[in-house]
Image (cartoon, rainbow, N blue to C red):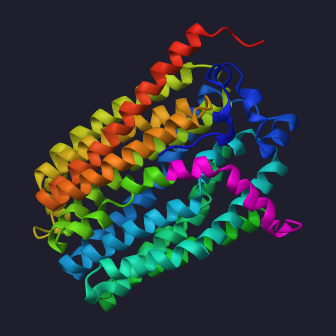
Amino acid sequence: MISGPEPSAHAAKSSESIKRPREAATDDPVLSEIVHSGTPKPSTRRSFLFRLLGFAGLPLLSLLTPFLLLPLVARIGGIHGWAALAIGQSVGAFAAIVVSFGWTLVGPARVARATDEARSELYGDSVISKFLLLLVVGPPAALAAFLLSPAEFRAESVSMALAMAVGSLSPAWYCIGVGRPRLIATYEVIPRVLSVGVAALLLQATGNITFYPICLIAATIGGVLVFSWRIGRIGSRPCFDTRRVLKTMWGDRNAALTVVAAGTYSATPVAIMGLVSPFSAVAQFSSADKLYRIASFSIQVLGNSFQGWVAEDRPVGISRRMKASLLAHSVLGLCGFAGLALLGAPLTHLLFGDEIAATELTAIWYGVTFAAVSMNTSMGRHILIPLGRTNIVLASTLTGAVFGVVAMAVLGLKFGSSGGAAGLAIGEIVVCLVQVGGLILLRRRARSTPLVP
């Protein structure tokens, strides 16, 4: 949901965070070297447009390809199989957020400002930290998927949870930082497209939906290994200084907590529904959730494209690029709300069948969620984080997580799939309100505080 610069910047005073972002950056030991070594020149408006097209091209194909496979999975697995895969995906997605440990938040801005040598070191550090966390988080995620899923589809649920957790190794954050979407296409999109094709053949031949997550795991591991060797140059790394990596992870704890808090209500709604609702309601809820995840790809593409572009500008206040991001995300949010509210229920009936199709009210609440997420993506990732206000973003995500989880559990228990969707929307709306309040406070302080020489 959010991504940006080093978490240590939030310790600075509000006025200094806005007026002197370069000095705040040097508080980070990694960025200190980068700042003194020189940084790439900011991209032009034309290069940003090419970046936007790149991030929206083949990644869209990567998303639509498994979408074509989902109707086959739904009809083979039925209500219980569909619910089991959805629960495994939800649990695994949350595990992936924990494993990423804030690299999607702090990584792109660091890489955008780094020299080639520093970029290689940053990527190597990310691989070490993610691998260590995957060893810790993977087994509990598999166990949770096993316990929450229908007995006859537990193996499928565990496989999907592991597939999602392994997906956290993706180098997409690095590609976003360097502004090269072609790397994502080569090392992530193409392997996934091929894996989905193989999975479709195996599903039709065997009727076993376990092949779907197994193929995803193989594609992810293969792409990451090749990327790490060729682009990340991890083979030329002189040593794996685990102690230094752990120290860096401790310094990034606020960023990691922010991402984990956001993931509590953005990645786990299906798992929460699995705790409070019957599997039939979970299946209906997950159908709407699938459609929402596909639609929210547009938010990801727009957010990724603006992220490095805004950071390159080294903003000292609310810049034109930030305003452009907020306007673009506002328009996208309204369009997404209208699309999901009007077309969500009919599309799930057509794609997944009557038994597990989403209700109209569930689709409407997911439309509200889409609009809120689009707005807080821009306010958090493109405005507050570049200004060094990680603390405001952390407060918004923690508050939203509390309201969202409680609302999903209470409303899901009482109203089923539509109640769970309403709870999810409430959490995201709370995030927006807290961030708007933070922006208003920052603007007032900036006007009343003189520029620090």
Please, what is the dominant secondary structure of the magenta stretch?
Answer: helix
Q: Is residue 202 left or right of residue 316?
A: left
Residue 64 can be seen in this image: yes
Q: Is residue 282 left or right of residue 379?
A: left
Residue 47 can be seen in this image: no
Q: Point out residue 302 in the picture as x, y percentages from the top left corner.
A: 47, 39
Q: Toward which corner of the image does residue 332 lie, by quadrant?
A: top left
Q: Which of 309 and 3 is in front in this view?
A: 3
In which quadrant of the rendered image does the C terminus lie? Answer: top right
Instruction: Give above or below for 420 relative to 238.
Output: above
Q: Point out residue 345 in the picture as x, y percentages from the top left corner.
A: 15, 54
Instruction: Give above or below for 301 relative to 171.
Output: above
Q: In this view, does 167 lie to the left or right of 67?
A: right
- At a point 58% along the width and 32% down the height, the residue shown is 389
Instruction: Give above or below for 46 relative to 113.
Output: above
Magenta segment boundaries in residue numbering: 234-259
- At a point 48% along the width and 29% down the height, the residue shown is 325
Q: Point out residue 85 in the picture as x, y percentages from the top left corner.
A: 32, 75
